[in-house]
Image (cartoon, rainbow, N blue to C red):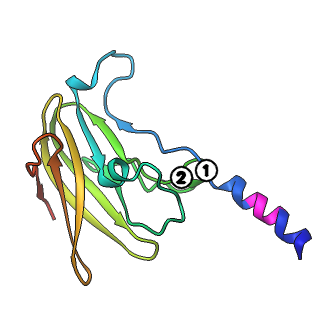
Amino acid sequence: MRKIFTPVFIALLGLHGCAEMPDYSNVDPLVPGDDARYTIIETDTYAGRAQRHYADLQPDLNIIKINDKKVGNIPFSTYYYKNDSPQRAILKPGTYTVQLEYRLPQHFMFADLEFEGKPGQKIIARTQYVGLNRLEVWMEDAATGEIVSKRVR
């Protein structure tokens, strides 16, 4: 049994990634700039749990789509990264529709939120458990706490 278990365990460890999925950005990488020129979105998973890991059984809030462009939930990406979706996005200022995924080990929910991004603004996507199978998802300005999003669907 031990002869079989050890190689299988090592192979599984090799398949599971260790790095964070890189931030999504629609900013041209050749244009130098600082964060004061862009809108930054972070999920409360990223901002609140820096030491999260794959098997902690805690809910994750992931960025799946930005303006109907798929940026997360990428198949086979977990071979390289801890998660299959970015937890942070750096965007040019403007109006955006973001699809967020609230994920537990066996359940998930999608929420589409629309917001107007301003230069130098940091937005945090948050969730709150309301009751049995009920959840609120919103985006707020990190500096003021003001809700900046509205539900699309």
Quarter occupied by the N terminus = bottom right
The picture quadrant where one finds residue 19 is top right
Q: Residues within 10 Å of mark 1 (few under 14, many from 20)?
A: some
Label 1, on which residue?
A: 17
* Disc number placed over residue 135 in the picture, else none: none
Vertical placement of 100 versus 130: above or below? above
Residue 98 in picture, x, y percent from top left: 24, 51
Q: Closest to the observer: 79 or 61?
A: 61
The picture quadrant where one finds residue 92 is top left
Label 2, on which residue?
A: 82
The picture quadrant where one finds residue 34 is top left
Residue 107 in picture, x, y percent from top left: 39, 75
**Marks 1 and 2 close (CB-CB < 8 Å):** yes
Residue sitting farthest toward the bottom? 132
Q: Is residue 18 left or right of residue 125?
A: right
Residue 51 in picture, x, y percent from top left: 47, 51
Q: Closest to the observer: 40 or 131?
A: 131
Vertical placement of 13 versus 128: above or below? above
Q: Amino acid at mark 2?
A: Lys
**Which badge, 1 or 2, is on the more N-terminal residue?**
1
Q: Residue at x 38, y 17 (%)?
A: 30
The secondary structure making up most of the magenta span is helix
Quarter occupied by the C terminus = bottom left
Residue 128 belongs to the span the image colors magenta: no
What is the distance, in whole Å, between disc 1 and disc 2 at their CAs?
A: 5 Å
Q: Residue at x 21, y 23 (%)?
A: 37
Q: Closest to the observer: 85 or 132?
A: 132
Which residues fall within the magenta stretch? Answer: 7-11
Residue 83 in picture, x, y percent from top left: 49, 54
Q: Residues within 10 Å of mark 2 (few under 14, many from 20)?
A: some
Q: Residue at x 53, y 52 (%)?
A: 82
Q: Amino acid at mark 1?
A: Gly
